[in-house]
Image (cartoon, rainbow, N blue to C red):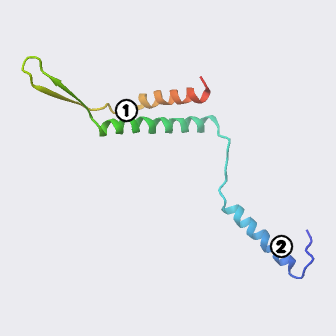
Amino acid sequence: MSVDTKYGEAIFKQTQEVAEMFKAAMPKITTNKNGYEIRTKVLEMAQGNVWNDYHAKFAGWEQTVKRDKDTGEIITEVKLPEVPGADAVLEAADKFYAFVNGK
């Protein structure tokens, strides 16, 4: 490319350097993911969902109030939620993956 002014060549060179600097600073975006990356993301989503559900249940322990038929006393039961394991996460991941696949 030719530059017709006295300082055009220097300006052009500086502009190219600035453009290269910005190109290097910008994040590289990849839009296509392979199957492993998709499965990993689905597992992360499932794990987050299962644990959020557990924490919500833990925060508001299920409490039921019953009256004993014989004595008339009020009995309070506190039932803590079950801590989710890998099976719960994989089950949720299967549901998410089935949704993504449109099944």
Q: Position of residue 92 (x, y in %)?
A: 47, 29
Q: Secondary structure at mark 2?
A: helix
Give the distance between the C-alpha atoms of the residues marked 2 and 1, in whole angstroms. Answer: 61 Å
Q: Residues within 10 Å of mark 1 (few under 14, many from 20)?
A: few
Residue at point 83% right, 73% down? 12
Residue 82: name its quadrant. Answer: top left
Asked which secondary structure carries label 1, the reply is loop
Which residue appears at 12% of the width and 20% of the height? 68
Going from N to C along the chain, the mark reached first, 2 or 1, is: 2
Q: Mark 1 sits on what residue?
A: 84
In the image, is 19 to the left or to the right of 91? Answer: right
Please state which of residues 90 and 8 is positioned toward the viewer in this rendering: 8
Q: Give the amino acid type for the residue marked by disc 1 in the picture.
A: Pro
Check residue 12 in the rendering and tell me which mark sits there, or answer none.
Answer: 2
- Identify which residue is drawn at 55% across, 39% down: 41
User: What quarter of the picture does the C terminus occupy?
Assistant: top right
Closest to the observer: 80 or 34? 80
Q: Name the kind of residue labelled 2 in the image.
A: Phe
Residue at the (50%, 39%) spot, across then down: 44
User: Residue 74 at x, y = what percent?
Assistant: 13, 27
Quadrant hosting residue 8: bottom right
User: Is 46 rendered above or below residue 12?
Assistant: above
Question: Percent x, y for residue 4?
Answer: 93, 77
